[in-house]
Amino acid sequence: MKQVTFTLAATDGMARRGRIDTPRGDIQTPAFMPVGTAATVKAMYPEQVRETGAEILLGNTYHLMLRPGAERVAALGGLHTFMNWERPILTDSGGFQVMSLSKLRKLTEKGVTFKSHIDGSAYELTPERSMEIQTLLDSDIIMQFDECLALPAPYNEMERAMELSLRWADRSKNAFNDQQNRALFGIVQGGDNAELRARSARGLRSIGFDGYAVGGLAVGEPQEVMFRVLSEITPELPTDRPRYLMGVGKPDDILGGIERGIDMFDCVHPTRAGRHGHVYTRFGVINLKNARHKEDHRPIDEQSPNPNCRRWSRAYLHHLVRTEEILGAMILSQINLHYYQELTAGARNAIEGGTFADYAAQTRASWAAGDLPPL
Amino acid sequence: MKQVTFTLAATDGMARRGRIDTPRGDIQTPAFMPVGTAATVKAMYPEQVRETGAEILLGNTYHLMLRPGAERVAALGGLHTFMNWERPILTDSGGFQVMSLSKLRKLTEKGVTFKSHIDGSAYELTPERSMEIQTLLDSDIIMQFDECLALPAPYNEMERAMELSLRWADRSKNAFNDQQNRALFGIVQGGDNAELRARSARGLRSIGFDGYAVGGLAVGEPQEVMFRVLSEITPELPTDRPRYLMGVGKPDDILGGIERGIDMFDCVHPTRAGRHGHVYTRFGVINLKNARHKEDHRPIDEQSPNPNCRRWSRAYLHHLVRTEEILGAMILSQINLHYYQELTAGARNAIEGGTFADYAAQTRASWAAGDLPPL
């Protein structure tokens, strides 16, 4: 019997409150998944990630197949053991990063051959090999292999890539071989075209997946285009399966995604922004590099539930960012991941209570009101 | 009444077991002080530093006067508040880093003018300004301003710098103005010459300090020269004051320093080595970049009291080092600082029990036996 299941507990408008059960623990949805690209969420111990409220991480097949290699991770006990994260892990299929990072790639019906961006050595990735790698990593939620285009793109290109991704979805499903302790998600492609997206969704539904991702967004298009595509596509997806918006985003992208019926999100943005001195808070985004903070003894937000928002002065954080100290990356990454978890936890509570529209409006008003006035 | 005092509890050969009491807490000696150059021990939260056993940190006057500036730190509540470290802090005088890092420096009887290595802006450092800065930082143990030469150096240069440092010691003492809640340490100079060192020590004793540092070592000379100078100089220092060997060193330097009557040490080496993939253990130093670790599922040392030595495979740490992940710097810095604290704690116990010679011999034998055999 399938050990990864989805339960839809409540809806509020299009927004959904649910739970994914897996052998490695439950995931309350809507959920944000921190990204552990190279088997580490950058600048965080795994227990620090857990303490922010995260219940599941994302691992990148492309990075892990290059270093340290899927077979090596398997020999070392799988990705959870390797990186000391006991809870669920979702792995992407490698397709997106092959397109965005690798060199000399060649796409055929069979798959993609490419050279590593690290040392130029040659690799092949196919639906079958992607399933094999994700299984070697011991992933709990496996993504089909797909082709992801940057936007804008010509219709013919979007159609070709969508249809190829559907054929790869079918091969991914066959290669996945109905493993009972893992889930396999399909990925809706089709660029910014509603008809292509709907065809993609229908095709995936007829193959049948444990969950449905929306791929090929947040790849250069304006937020309004992404939101339009989401509004068009979520009604085409089954209600009894989780929906995952890949690679998104900033807090307001996530709020808008939840509003349109998305259950799961992942993005490197909170940790990357933290390493560059930007923190997300109920005041919106704060750039700690800015000179206005250099003598500011106040913490980021003294009413935050997160100790890192209360215990350090803005002046100290400004100093750490300016001097490029690792502790700055550590603290600011934690603050951002914590805020993303607060945001999704707040959304879950609001959907349960039927007050999601109010929650979204209040959250946006708080961001719009901005930061504390300068000292 | 002076609130910073030293109590010598036991001796074993030249080795000493003591305690420094300060208003911000006690320091058991021999003690290793982690270095928090720019108001942070690199890649560590302050409570993680404390959990390694550290009881006192070192802060660098040169770095802090440039960024964020001593007056700014004072306005923000002092260095302890600024960086969230409640226990004692020792600050150096700035002299060493002015010589090693700054540009276009000019030395006169009055002090040193120099340009910042960061932005080229001009500064002056004198004994009086150094005392002022260290007081603004709210340091618990203040170092006299001195001139530190690299070795080897001509006799005349060593004599000139030693005599200048003595005159600056006198001015430092006057400017320090007998603050009761802080200690002021003098610094013995004189290069590798026993007679100059003895003259320096006599001069400092006649001025009178709360503690005596040995400066101008670990500046390019072989370890045997450093050990000879230490053996010659510690008998010239008062027994009722702490002795501090500045900027030293690797574990075997510290063991040799304790053997020769030193009570306090500081060095960036453990955190810097950690950032470069080297860890210190009872097996000696281990280079985690080495390919021998890439498939090694074993932890660094499963018998270590430090969880970070037990919970991560060598293969994972190798991976973090090779991919230059921040978590690698975080874990390996912690492992090194923890080992330095284990080493000094072991020395303290051995001196108390009158078994320091055995402890030193066993520790060296363990290092010499080396790492686990490869898998």
Image: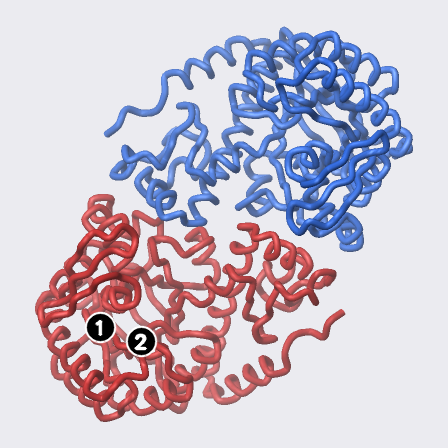
Chain colours: A red, B blue
Provide the secondary structure element on which disc 1 rests.
strand
Residue designated by label 1 = A185
- Residue A344 visible in the current orientation: yes
Q: Earlier in the sequence, mark 2 or mark 1?
A: 1
Marks 2 and 1, how far apart at CA: 9 Å
- Give the residue type that dot 2 points to: Tyr
Q: A145 left or right of B130?
A: left
Looking at the rendered structure, the number of numbered marks drawn on it comes to: 2
- Please tell me whether mark 2 sits on a helix, a strand or a loop: strand
| Residue type of the residue flagged with mark 1 | Phe
Mark 2 in CB contact with mark 1 (< 8 angstroms) = yes
The percent position of residue A170, horizontal first and vertical second, equals: 10, 75
Location of residue B253 in the rendering, given as x and y in whole percent from the top left corner: 55, 19
Q: Is residue A368 above or below residue B159?
A: below
Residue A159 in the image: above or below residue B322: below
The residue sitting at 76% across, 33% down in the picture is B141
Q: In x, y percent, where is residue B34?
A: 60, 35
Residue shown at 40% from the left, 64% from the top:
A34
Q: Quadrant of the N terminus of chain B?
A: top right
On what subunit does the disc labeled 1 rest?
A
**For residue A244, which numbered disc appears in the image?**
2
